[in-house]
Amino acid sequence: MKYVFLALAIILEVAGSSLLKAGEQFTKIIPSSLAILSYVACFYFLSMSLKHIPLGTAYAIWAGLGIVLTVGASVVIFKQSLDLPAVIGIVLIIAGVVVLNFFSKSAAH
C-alpha cells in the first residue's frame, strides 16, 4: 500500500501542476480550484506513504517522477518542446531514482 499512496501522490502532484498552467495565474476558477484540491490530496497521500517509506527515499521518488511526468504532460498537453539539455537532465533524474531504489541501502523496501 505504501507505494500505492506514493503513486497517488505523484499523479495528483502532476495533475495539480498541469492545472496550475491551465488556471492561468489563478484567473480561471475551475482549474485553479482543482489545482488546490489536487495538491491537498497529493500531500495527504504523500504523508500516508511516509508511515512506511523513509522521508528521503519517498521525497526523491516523488520529486523525481513528478518532474519527469510533469515534463511529459507539458509536452503532450501544452505542446511545449524540450531541448537536448532538458532531455539529458530528465535522464539523469530517472537514473537517480533508479540508483536510489535498486542500489541504495538507505531505501528500505
Image: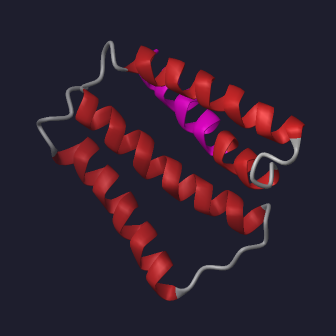
* Residue at point 29%, 57% (across, down): 96
Q: Is residue 63 magenta?
A: no
In the image, is 20 to the left or to the right of 59?
A: right
Residue furthest to the bottom: 84
Relative vertical location of residue 47 with respect to residue 60 in this rendering, above or below: above
Q: Nearer the viewer, residue 23 or 12?
A: 23
* Residue at point 21%, 34% (across, down): 107
Residue 19, image quadrant? top right
Q: Position of residue 30 (x, y in %)?
A: 88, 36
Residue furthest to the left: 105
In the rendered image, the quadrant that contains the C terminus is top left
Determine the main secondary structure of the stretch shown in magenta: helix
For the record, the magenta segment spans 1-14
* Residue at point 70%, 26% (across, down): 37
* Residue at point 54%, 37% (across, down): 10
In the image, is 3 to the left or to the right of 40?
A: left
Q: Nearer the viewer, residue 46 or 100?
A: 46
Relative vertical location of residue 28 with respect to residue 3 in this rendering, above or below: below
Relative vertical location of residue 71 with respect to residue 12 in this rendering, above or below: below
In the image, is 45 to the left or to the right of 61?
A: right
Q: Position of residue 39 (x, y in %)?
A: 61, 31
In the image, is 16 to the left or to the right of 42?
A: right
Q: Is residue 2 magenta?
A: yes
Relative vertical location of residue 2 with respect to residue 33 in this rendering, above or below: above
